[in-house]
Image (spheres, rainbow, N blue to C red):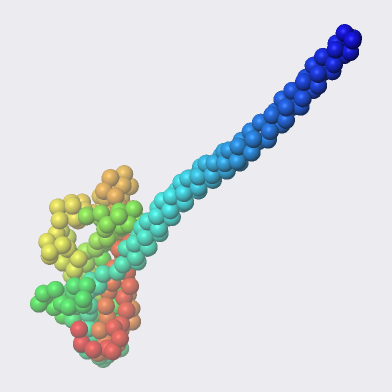
Amino acid sequence: MGGIHESVRTFNSTLRTLIFSVLVGGAGVAGWQGYSLYNEPQQQLAAKQDELDSLRVDLAAREQELLGLGEELDAKNQQLDRARTSLRLLKLSHRIARFRVLDQVENEETGRKLTTIEFYEVNNEGAPIDDRRKKFEIEGEHIYVECLVAKFDDKYIERADLDRSTAICLFQRIFGEYQQPQEGYQLDEMGSSPTSYARGGQISEFEQKIWDDFWNIASDRKKAAELGIRAAHAIAPSTRVKKGVTYELELRSTGEFSLVPISGNTPG
């Protein structure tokens, strides 16, 4: 009898242990499932947050890159504007003088043409600067206008330097093909004001210094460089002329001359 009871107790104990194990296992499974159900969304949220943070960092980097590109573009545009301005200044020409052919006859003794002209300086609109119109009778029909010119380095012209933004010139003589230059008619005296481009009609101290010492500057490269001058010399643009035509002399900022007839051939 006692053995039966002992067997029953053993069975009950084993059964309780089994049931407890089942319950504990079920609780563990349930707990793990519950933990998984709770934790998985959290992990997904964290992953999404990491992804979002990465995208934000990437977006910030791209914004910084775009900002840099924008600044670079602005710098390029500024360089382009400066280049355009420099090119415009380098090509800028100033009207400085005109002469009109009043008469043209043949010398019976020599058979050469005698050309009577009226010479006057003008402003950049082509209007005479003053009433100083000079008349000359020139031997020949090919007219030369001799000038002294000082040309400045392009860098000064490009940045519109106050004293060196354009080449400067001083008229010397006018003559024809049958005359020696020294036989030509005097136009301006050395050191006089080149009124066609002088600021307010007054020659500056800087220009006066150049005209007072022009030939020494022209022959001394070091002295010329100290003044920003790349070349200083005489030049004599010329053209074959006809009666009744007005011709205009222009000086480019870089120092080149042009001598052309005015369209319409109307009096200046």
The residue lying toward the viewer, choosing from 248 and 186, is: 248
Q: In which quarter of the image is residue 254?
A: bottom left
* Residue 140, image x, y percentages: 29, 82
193 displayed left or right of 158: left
Answer whether residue 177 is visible to the viewer in this image.
no
Q: What residue lies at 46% left-to-right and 49% top-to-bottom? A: 63
Question: Is 162 located above or below residue 58 in the figure?
Answer: below
Q: What residue lies at 27% left-to-right and 60% top-to-bottom? A: 166
The residue lying toward the viewer, choosing from 116 and 156, is: 156
Q: Quadrant of the C terminus?
A: bottom left
The residue lying toward the viewer, choosing from 263 and 246, is: 263
Q: Quadrant of the N terminus?
A: top right
Q: What residue lies at 14% left-to-right and 73% top-to-bottom? A: 129
163 displayed left or right of 192: right
Q: What residue lies at 54% left-to-right and 44% top-to-bottom? A: 52
* Residue 216, image x, y percentages: 25, 50
* Residue 251, image x, y percentages: 29, 68
Label total for image: 0
Farthest residue to the top: give it: 2
* Residue 7, image x, y percentages: 87, 14
The residue lying toward the viewer, choosing from 100 and 105, is: 100
135 displayed left or right of 182: left
Answer whether residue 30 is visible to the viewer in this image.
yes
Q: In which quarter of the image is residue 103?
A: bottom left
Question: Is 217 located above or below residue 176 in the figure?
Answer: above
Farthest residue to the left: give it: 131
